[in-house]
Image (tube, rainbow, N blue to C red):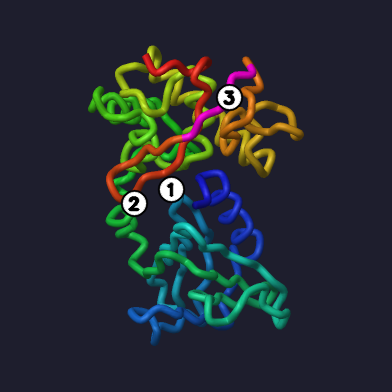
């Protein structure tokens, strides 16, 4: 599943293509919106909260709507020139937004819904602070309180919980736990400085946004410390990297760690 930095890059791409444009056509290929026509709407911009995309539109009658989409595991937004061949099979397209200078196609989107812009909080208000958002002092206080609210909860599972902080997935969770020296399968209470962990996570996401990929080591030949490096030697101490599950029952994800750099106790 794309993580917060990849979703933000998607919104940037949609903004370059559509922001300020009047839609010449639309096709919403989900049952509940099958008869909806957004032709004539002006695209204000696409913004994000964590992994959620919010494309704000102003209709000809001045009503404001938000197209809420989520990539889930397999979704993507592709931008092409009008009339160009689609970079994916038509039966996988869920949303088509056409304007004079570009066409945006959402393939395999896991979520598509349309709601009044004034009601955006109904779909993202339950989420934790966005690590790539403004990140005010209040955001930091809220995120820290949510992270430490259940000290006995597994750290990796807590960091993946989007109601704690929004934007982290398995890549950044694994990497920030390594840099923090924290075992992802240990309880939250084992983290000596949870605020520092949150700040590191934010810096990592911003770095990923800047570089277009995870680059936590600073070396493009070996860009990550532990993610998907199971059975390989740790770049720091040469101990063999291990892998194992974290997450809630039925929604487990794989995480990675160095048993020497990240002792369980």
Residue 254 lies in what quarter of the image? Answer: top left
Tell me the residue that label 1 is attached to.
49
Answer whether labels 1 and 3 touch (C-beta < 8 Å): no
Q: Position of residue 210 (x, y in %)?
A: 66, 39
Q: Residues within 10 Å of mark 2 (few under 14, many from 20)?
A: many
Badge 1 element: strand
Residue 47 percent coordinates (x, y):
49, 53
For the residue carrying disc 1, how many other residues have a C-alpha within 10 Å: few (<14), some (14-19), or many (20+)?
Answer: many
Mark 1 or mark 3: which comes first in sequence? 1
Query: Which residue carries the number 2 mark?
Result: 124
> Is residue 138 among the parts visible in the rendering?
no
User: Label 3 crowding class (10 Å Cα cut-off): few <14, some 14-19, many 20+?
Assistant: some
- Report whether 210 appears left or right of 136: right
Q: Mark 3 to mark 2: distance in Å?
A: 40 Å
Q: Name the residue at 29% across, 43% down.
A: 248
Residue 86 falls inside the magenta stretch: no
Location of residue 76 in the rendering, given as x and y in whole percent from the top left corner: 56, 63
Quarter residue 20 falls in: bottom right
Question: As displayed, is residue 50 above or below residue 56?
Answer: above
Q: CA distance from mark 2 to mark 1?
A: 7 Å
Say which of marks 1 and 3 sits in front. 3
Determine the main secondary structure of the stretch shown in magenta.
loop
Q: Which residues are magenta?
A: 238-243
Residue hosting label 3: 240
In the rendered view, would you say 245 is above or below 20? above
**Residue 119 image offset from top left, x and y in percent:** 30, 59
Q: Nearer the viewer, residue 214 or 59?
A: 214
């Amino acid at each position: 599943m794309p993580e917060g930095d990849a979703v933000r890059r998607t919104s940037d791409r949609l903004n370059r293509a559509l922001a300020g444009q009047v839609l010449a056509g639309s096709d919403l290929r989900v049952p509940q919106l099958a008869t909806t026509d957004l032709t004539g709407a002006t695209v204000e911009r696409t913004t994000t909260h964590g992994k959620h995309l919010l494309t704000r539109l102003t209709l000809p009658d001045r009503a404001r709507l938000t197209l809420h989409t989520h990539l889930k595991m397999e979704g993507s937004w592709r931008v092409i020139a009008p009339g160009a061949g689609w970079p994916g099979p038509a039966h996988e397209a869920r949303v088509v937004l056409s304007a004079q200078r570009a066409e945006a196609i959402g393939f395999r989107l896991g979520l598509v819904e349309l709601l009044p812009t004034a009601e955006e909080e109904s779909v993202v208000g339950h989420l934790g602070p966005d690590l790539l958002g403004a990140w005010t002092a209040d955001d930091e206080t809220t995120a820290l309180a949510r992270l430490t609210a259940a000290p006995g909860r597994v750290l990796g599972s807590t960091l993946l919980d989007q109601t704690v902080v929004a934007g982290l997935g398995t890549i950044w969770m694994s990497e920030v736990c390594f840099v923090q020296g924290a075992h992802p399968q240990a309880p939250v209470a084992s983290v000596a400085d949870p605020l520092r962990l949150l700040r590191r996570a934010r810096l990592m996401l911003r770095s990923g946004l800047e570089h277009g990929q995870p680059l936590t080591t600073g070396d493009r030949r070996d860009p990550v410390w532990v993610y998907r490096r199971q059975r390989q030697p740790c770049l720091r101490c040469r101990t063999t990297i291990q892998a194992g599950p974290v997450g809630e029952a039925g929604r487990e994800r794989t995480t990675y760690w160095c048993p020497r750099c990240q002792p369980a106790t």
